[in-house]
Image (tube, helix red, strand yellow):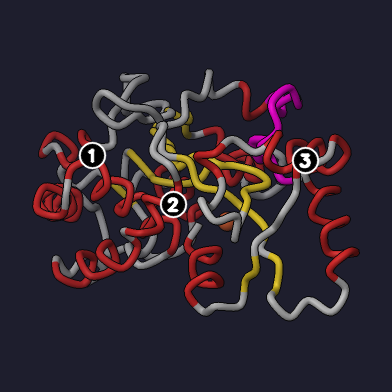
Amino acid sequence: IGRLKEAVDLGIAQPIKSELLDKVVPPQYRDPEGLWYAISARARVVYASRDRVPQNEITYEELADPKWKGKICIRSGQHIYNNALIGAMIAKHGEAKTEEWLKGLKANLAQKPSGGDREQARDVAAGRCDIGIGNTYYWALMKTSANQKDWAEATKVILPTFAGGGTHVNVSGVVLAKNAPNKANAMKLIEWLAGDTAQHMYADTNYEYPIVAGIKVNDIIAGYGKLNPDPMPLSKIAENKKAAANLVDKVGFDN
Ligand code: FE
């Protein structure tokens, strides 16, 4: 959502007017003005050590609980995936509470934030931490890769929820350039991306959750359990991106 929001803020997007997209993309996954639409979704989840983490449920709020002191691994707080998660926390609880949460999470880190999402599973597998934070599709990509399979297999995916809410979901999506010289073709491509063929490709090639209801989720992803996405509209999360980035700096999350 961070990149979609950036495109809108730069003023390079024009409204996408499509009856098809309005029908198949749920309102929480599109811009209120139609400047972006999500095409597929992924959840930000916990990769927990199979050996050392007995629990199978967790809240995002709990990640700040001192019981995890020295046990959590995560990539930079300034990465867009984490900015969005922190932005969602701000939308839920406000800035002051989110700052406390972020301080608590920082205090629980096993090491300075580094690497990408897959490296967090790698570090859980190596015993450097008990919990890594990552997106749903990276776990499937590791599980199906020759040399990262062990990282996936040392961990189990837990779909966290906000206390009293659902799981934080981010998206990949489309914007239509304001100066698009071939607008009609662009619209064809956009509508194709929301069609059955492309939705199955998102599900089975990139291991995303299809945005269109009724398209089968890949078996590896379905194996995490039933996803209950948090109902917060993504536009609300995007509105808090800047505040999230500021908090990351303020608490020195990456230092
Ligand atoms: Fe990614």
Alpha carbon of mark 1 to alpha carbon of mark 3: how far? 39 Å
Q: Main secondary structure of the magenta part?
A: loop
| Mark 2–mark 3 CB contact (< 8 Å) | no
Q: Quadrant of residue 14?
A: bottom right
Q: Quadrant of residue 25?
A: top right
Q: Which residue is mark 1?
A: 63
Query: Is residue 11 inside the magenta stretch?
Result: no
Q: Tell me the quadrant of the picture where the C terminus can be found.
A: bottom left
- Mark sitting on residue 20: 3
Q: Which residue is mark 2?
A: 235
Q: Nearer the viewer, residue 203 or 191?
A: 191
Residue at 62%, 29% (x, y): give it.
221
Residue type indicated by callout 3 = Leu
Residue type indicated by callout 1 = Leu
**Mark 1 or mark 3, which is nearer to you?**
3
Specify the segment rendered in magenta: 206-219
**Mark 2 or mark 3, which is nearer to you?**
3
